[in-house]
Image: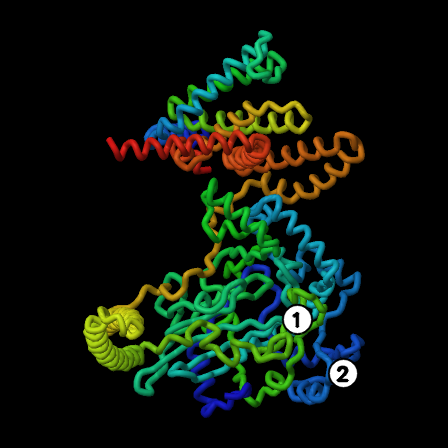
Amino acid sequence: MTAIDRPANPTGDLALLRRHEPIVRYTQGEAFFPMEVTTYLAHATLWEREPNGQVRALAQPGELNAVRLGELVDDVDGRTFLNVATEASAADMARSILPGQRVQAEGFRRGPGRLARVGYLSRFADALFAGSLLLRGRVPGGIARSSALWYRTTAHGGPHPYYGRVFRDAGWTVLQYWFFYAFNDWRSAFHGANDHEADWEQITLFLSSEDEGEPIPRWAAYAQHDYHGEALRRRWDDAEQLQVVDGHPVVFAGAGSHASYFVPGEYQAEQELRLPGWMHVIADVVGRLFGNKSDEDRQRLLPIAFVDYARGDGVSIGPGQERVWAPVLLDQTQPWAFEYSGLWGVSIQDPFEGEDAPAGPVFNRDGSVRGSWFDPLGFSGLDRVAPPEREAEELERRAKQVVVEQGALQEDIAEIGRQLVASGAELEAIRHDANLQHEAEAARVTIEELRVRNRKQRLALTESYSRAEAIERRRERIGAGMMDAPRAHATRIATPVPTGSIAYGRVLELWAALSIGLLLIGLVVTLLVAPKYGFVAATLLIAAFIFVESVLRGTVVALVTTVSVALALIASVILAIHFWVPLVIAGALVAGVFVIAQNLRELG
Amino acid sequence: MTSPSTAQASLDEEAIQRPRPRLLLLAPVLAILLIQAVFQLLAAWTTFRLFGAPGRIPQIATIFAVLNLVATVGLVSGRRFGWIMAMSLSGWNVGYYLVLWWIGVPFYLGMALAALIVFLLGSREMRHAYRADVT
């Protein structure tokens, strides 16, 4: 199938999309909701960044529409991007932060501070990350506010469309719902990782049907930070993870980020600073010897924590909610989707891409086609899963193949056996004849080769029997209507941070906010005031900060253990270097005594 | 709501119920702590120096000796605070001996004994026995 879908029955497809369209619940304080791309285009400027870096306008506000967008970029060489947001005027900026006039995060209640959730090193990494925004380019804060002002005055109160697509593949009917937002203000309004103009988010439902009947939803996949493949989807009957109201799945959108979550709550999204491999090795060894951390935790040295608030306590859009959808079928009647591969929003040229606007539903930022568009099944890890109605049939087919394989293996094993016996008989006949020693040696080699083949084929046959039994057991389970555990397909899924574990005290939150800045100032002052004792003073200052932190967190025991073990390791290295000769001698003596004792015990 | 002292008491009670560490691990720790306490007092108040151990200010040495004894009693009675005190004192001692080594007056025996206690106390068995594996 090409990038452009040509559904056979647009009316039926739209009805199907409507039947299972989601209910999206936003967090209190969300400023941007799904809007029409046509409204955005009507106010947008289209830019081209030429290969030499120059930026030129291809169309001014008022000149664009859904059809003309594709025509204008048809023979353009450089990368293109759209832009509505501009820096707000000083008056607008001032007005927008007055009580009752706020355009961003109005009514939003911040959760326990993200900085308090991580230690010093991660806070320092966070400071580096914030500093990197200055170097790598970022969306200025004024643009977020002006976008919110623009959205409030221009698009707020307008229809809320989703752009729906129906795709049929391998027995599945795939429903994709795309949502377009004017801005992602996760960083500027909700202390998140990034801001960017415009935002495209999607959810996908997977349906199947028996005998061409009405398709029944089986799975739902929501796009989320840090997750991919199987981890994105939940089974339709997994009531603990997926809320369904009258056939409509409920989505909890992240505040500002608009990422989609199955369960309401606060999600800790983490970014990991890239560190040299040897640092991970050392951390892993020390962690294994003296720590209690899991394998995964040991590898996360400098996680920068960002909180994605998906509380669902704000506006809801969907059937039976205060706001409803105005669906649009995403097919060839929407040329903007297929003909424009540029960015929807201002291009910052961020090397990490976090602050760059996204491309549309069909394309990646680099102009290639999105995996979720051309292969929705693979994107959600469903490409290896048969629809439930067809699984028994697939198993039966596989069982027949296995029986055929077993027959071939049995024949092969019998033939090898015959050859072995024949070769063995021949060897016995010739091995005592001095003139036939070369032939005897060749027979021995042949026998050894046949034995290897025999072992290999017998092992394969044994495994094949086990496979056949497993397939049969699976068929029986399916026949009896037994289902797998709802989350058996995924090893790691996004779960909100439990409320109890993020109940930090105000003192710790304040300390987390101040500590890195205070430490840096303290170090500078120390070096200026007492340069002679700078190293000692700086060490003591850092130690004092670490101690205060551990007291506030109630982790003094862990701190004492870690520091003591670290010092003891250093001391051990010094001792080993200084006393290596006596240590080697002592080791040899101990080993000698041990060996003698072991041997004498055997005698006695 | 549980008060801090009640919570601490329950922690200590749990420590008692946990399996005691093997004598092979505990005995060297107790012995070294006791020996350290005795020789710290001797070094503080007399001219006796074990293998040239550095002297300390008498009052401070006395405090450390007493703390060593308290930690020893705590460990013997299976209390969590005994483990915490022993680990803190040993960590401090290792740091102290490292500083001495750095400034050119090393005392290797003290460094080795302090490091040994840290490793013994830091073993999984000891941490489990004294509930030092929970925060």
Q: Which residue in the structure is indicated by mark 1?
A: A357
Helix, strand or loop at label 2? It is strand
Q: Name the image colouring.
A: rainbow
Quarter containing the C terminus of chain A: top left
Subunit ID for the residue under disc 1: A
Q: Is residue A341 above or below residue A554?
A: below
Q: Which residue in the structure is indicated by mark 2?
A: A58
Q: Residue furthest front?
A: A435
Q: Is residue A91 above or below residue A426?
A: above
Quadrant in which residue A456 is drawn: bottom left
Residue name at image x 55 percent, y 33 percent: A580
Query: From where the camera sits, is residue A337 visible?
Result: yes
Residue name at image x 56 percent, y 75 percent: A160
Query: From where the camera sits, is residue A480 visible?
Result: no
Q: Which mark is residue A300?
A: none
Residue name at image x 77 percent, y 35 percent: A527
CA separation, marks 1 and 2? 18 Å
Name the foreground residue: B115 vs A396. B115
> Which x, y percent locates residue A493?
45, 61
Kind of residue sitting beneath label 1? Ala
Q: Residue furthest bottom?
A: A8
Quadrant in which residue A37 is drawn: bottom right
Q: Are marks 1 and 2 on the same chain?
A: yes
Mark 1 and mark 2 residues within 8 Å of each other at the beta carbon: no
Helix, strand or loop at label 1? It is loop
Q: Is residue B71 above or below residue A2?
A: above
> Which x, y percent locates residue A328?
54, 83
Residue name at image x 62 percent, y 46 percent: A121
Number of other residues with Cα within 10 Å of mark 2, as a class: few under 14, some 14 to 19, many 20 or more: some
Name the foreground residue: A80 vs A220. A80
Along the polypeptide, which appears first: circle 1 or circle 2? 2
Kind of residue sitting beneath label 2? Leu
